[in-house]
Image (cartoon, rainbow, N blue to C red):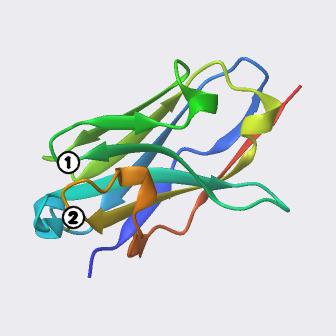
Amino acid sequence: QVQLVESGGGSVQNGGSLRLSCVASEDFASLYGAYGYCTAWFRQAPGKEREGVAAIRSDTTTTYVDSVKGRFTISRDNFKRTLYLQMDSLKPEDTAMYYCAAARRNRKYDPCLGIEYGYWGQGTQVTVSS
């Protein structure tokens, strides 16, 4: 059972930057399914549905939701068992609780932002003021 712990959230002004971190209790390799695994960042703002923000596959292929492309960068350090989300040029609409998640990838053509995630962190709040 992989446990995930996020950190790095906070309050910043419009245009600022934050770096989120998510440490896993086990090696990400333990997540390997038939077609690798996915690790991702999701966010949920008050009154809105949770949305996938960025994902990185076991082979390091990355995917981003359109609203953060060019501003956010997802990365992973397997040796440190840590997932990162570098967030630059933050906007008030980025305000949300951010969660990291991990999942096995068992079907070849499943996109990482389109699968069901079984492991979740507790979340870290990001607030961007205008």
- Does residue 82 lie above or below 73 as drawn? below
Question: In which quarter of the view is residue 44 placed?
Answer: bottom right
Q: Viewer-proximal residue, 80 or 44?
A: 44
Residue occupied by mark 1: 80
Residue 60 rendering spot, x and y as whole percentages? 21, 37
- Check disc 1 and give the amino acid type: Lys
10 Å crowding of disc 2: few (<14), some (14-19), many (20+) = few
Q: Viewer-proximal residue, 42 or 90?
A: 42
Going from the N terminus, do you reach mark 2 or mark 1 first? 1
Residue 70 rendering spot, x and y as whole percentages? 52, 18
10 Å crowding of disc 1: few (<14), some (14-19), many (20+) = few
Rounded to the nearest angstrom, the CA distance separating label 2 from label 1 is 27 Å
Residue 102 rendering spot, x and y as whole percentages? 34, 63
Which label was assigned to residue 107?
2
**Which quadrant holds the C terminus?**
top right
Question: In which quarter of the view is residue 16 placed?
Answer: top right
- Check disc 2 and give the amino acid type: Arg
Counting the numbered discs, the total is 2
Which label was assigned to residue 42?
none
Give SS at disc 1.
loop
CB within 8 Å, label 2 to label 1: no
